[in-house]
């Protein structure tokens, strides 16, 4: 992606700590991943969609939405031939035609959320990593079967190919990074045993190292041959949720659960810049433009931010520019029922007919409405045609035992409101706020 000088200037006024940023705005939920493409970008969101963006002197423009997943999209990567490959909480992966928005093929077989994705160097295979403890290699052309790797590898969070495509690196919730022979599917060795779950990896084979970020905040680079620690970049922030390597391999970007972005000079492992980009919540998504001139980042807000690395001053609060995210308001300004709604419901649901890109249907008129009947929303099989009618009793039961038990098979997140008063207050708030 080659950003014109005018577009870079648009992204952030030099030296301003809270300047207006170029933003990928339009999603209806938090940004889970971003990726650079030639002349544009891809964004993956909690709203079940992938956004396709063009970038130029007039700023970011939405080209189209890629709709087809039935739950939060966790990762999106460009694929050869004008395609994109995405993985999601619905246990599937999809290969897209970016130009038309068509879903070319859906890949099914995982039995847990799919968290990691990578494309082989020759562009013929896609690798997926899932919380079901398996990885898979999928042919992108034709309809051949996948090659399954592992059964008890722990919840897998990330995957990367070696430069020759012969080796896979798998990052696991059991604290390991394993090397796998891509042809046989056999684990050849454990490169890292960290002790806490490893969330993300970034590979620089030219310089012979792999960087990783873990649940406990551990941020390290290790030698690909010996496994020896080359640099320990751990700070008192956790967990590490995003890693990105610049195209020249000289800068490593690290995003964490406290909303900070750290830029590391990988030539000497010094910290070049460290700043809090998100006033609230984590940094889930990071990517460099392919000329390395700018960085794209996303988190709890429903827009990603873009800024040039050459600007003076750190872009503090870049991921919360302007108004606070609607689902992260100050609790002191709300009653208990409204607080419960914003904590448990607002990322997925709106109270009116707006927010069409939300992960869940609108709650407008929910009382007395049969489940699975909002027009235009793609419900799970568990709710499509359900006899449940939403009222005080059914909504209370939903949050008392949790959606996964009340409606087995639903794509609603697993969460509960255990206090009877909290549930009652939520219901009272919803009855007033969702009146038709």
Image (cartoon, rainbow, N blue to C red):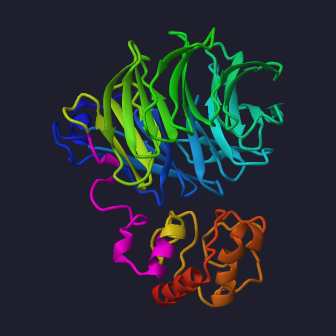
Q: Position of residue 141 (x, y in %)?
A: 72, 31
Q: Is residue 229 magenta?
A: no
Left/right of residue 73 with respect to residue 293 in the rendered view? right
| Quadrant of the rendered image containing residue 369 | bottom right
Q: Is residue 222 left or right of residue 325?
A: right
In the displayed structure, does residue 246 sit left or right of residue 191? left
Residue 133's place in the image compared with 412, above or below, is above
Q: Position of residue 257 (x, y in %)?
A: 47, 45
Tell me if residue 427 can be seen. Answer: yes
Instruction: Give me the residue at 43% from left, 21% from top.
Output: 247
Total marks drawn? 0
User: Is 73 located above or below residue 192 in the figure?
Assistant: below
In percent of width and height, residue 291 lies at 37, 23
Please tell me whether residue 328 belongs to the stretch shown in magenta.
yes
Which is more toward the observer, 112 or 102? Answer: 112
Mark yes or no: residue 407 visible. no
Of residue 231 and residue 241, the one placed in the foreground of this image is 231
Residue at image point 70% right, 48% down: 113
Q: Which residues are magenta?
A: 315-342
| Quadrant position of the N terminus in the picture | top left
| Residue 319, percent from left and from top | 35, 49
Question: Residue drawn 77% across and 44% down?
Answer: 132
């Amino acid at each position: 992606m080659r950003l014109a000088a005018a577009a870079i200037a648009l992204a952030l006024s030099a030296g301003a700590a809270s300047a207006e940023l170029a933003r990928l705005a339009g999603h209806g939920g938090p940004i889970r991943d971003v990726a650079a493409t030639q002349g544009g970008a891809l964004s993956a969101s909690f709203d079940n969609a992938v956004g396709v963006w063009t970038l130029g002197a007039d700023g970011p423009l939405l080209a189209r939405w890629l709709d087809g997943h039935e739950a939060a999209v966790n990762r999106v990567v460009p694929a050869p031939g004008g395609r994109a490959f995405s993985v999601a909480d619905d246990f599937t992966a999809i290969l897209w035609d970016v130009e038309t928005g068509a879903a070319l093929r859906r890949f099914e077989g995982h039995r847990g959320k799919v968290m990691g994705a990578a494309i082989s160097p020759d562009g013929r295979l896609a690798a997926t990593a899932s919380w079901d403890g398996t990885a898979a290699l999928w042919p992108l052309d034709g309809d051949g079967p996948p090659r399954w790797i592992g059964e008890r590898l722990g919840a897998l969070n990330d995957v990367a190919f070696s430069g020759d495509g012969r080796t896979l690196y798998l990052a696991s919730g059991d604290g390991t990074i394993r090397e796998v022979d891509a042809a046989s599917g056999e684990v050849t060795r454990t490169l890292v045993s960290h002790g806490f779950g490893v969330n993300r990896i970034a590979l620089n084979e030219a310089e012979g190292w792999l960087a990783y970020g873990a649940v406990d905040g551990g941020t390290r680079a290790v030698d690909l041959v010996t496994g020896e620690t080359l640099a320990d970049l751990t700070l008192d922030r956790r967990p590490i949720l995003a890693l990105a390597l610049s195209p020249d391999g000289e800068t490593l970007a690290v995003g964490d659960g406290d909303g900070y972005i750290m830029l590391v000079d990988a030539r000497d492992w010094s910290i070049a810049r460290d700043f809090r980009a998100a006033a609230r919540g984590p940094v889930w998504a990071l990517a460099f433009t392919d000329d390395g001139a700018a960085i794209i980042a996303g988190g709890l807000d429903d827009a990603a931010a873009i800024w040039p690395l050459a600007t003076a001053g750190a872009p503090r609060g870049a991921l919360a520019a302007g108004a606070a995210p609607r689902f992260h308001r100050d609790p002191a300004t709300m009653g208990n029922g409204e607080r419960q709604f914003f904590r448990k419901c607002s990322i997925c649901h709106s109270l009116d007919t707006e927010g069409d890109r939300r992960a869940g249907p609108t709650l407008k008129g929910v009382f007395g409405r049969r489940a699975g009947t909002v027009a235009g929303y793609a419900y799970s099989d568990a709710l499509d045609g359900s006899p449940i009618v939403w009222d005080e009793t059914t909504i209370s039961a939903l949050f008392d035992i949790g959606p996964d038990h009340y409606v087995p098979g639903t794509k609603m997140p697993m969460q509960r409101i255990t206090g009877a008063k909290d549930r009652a207050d939520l219901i009272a708030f919803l009855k007033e706020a969702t009146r038709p």
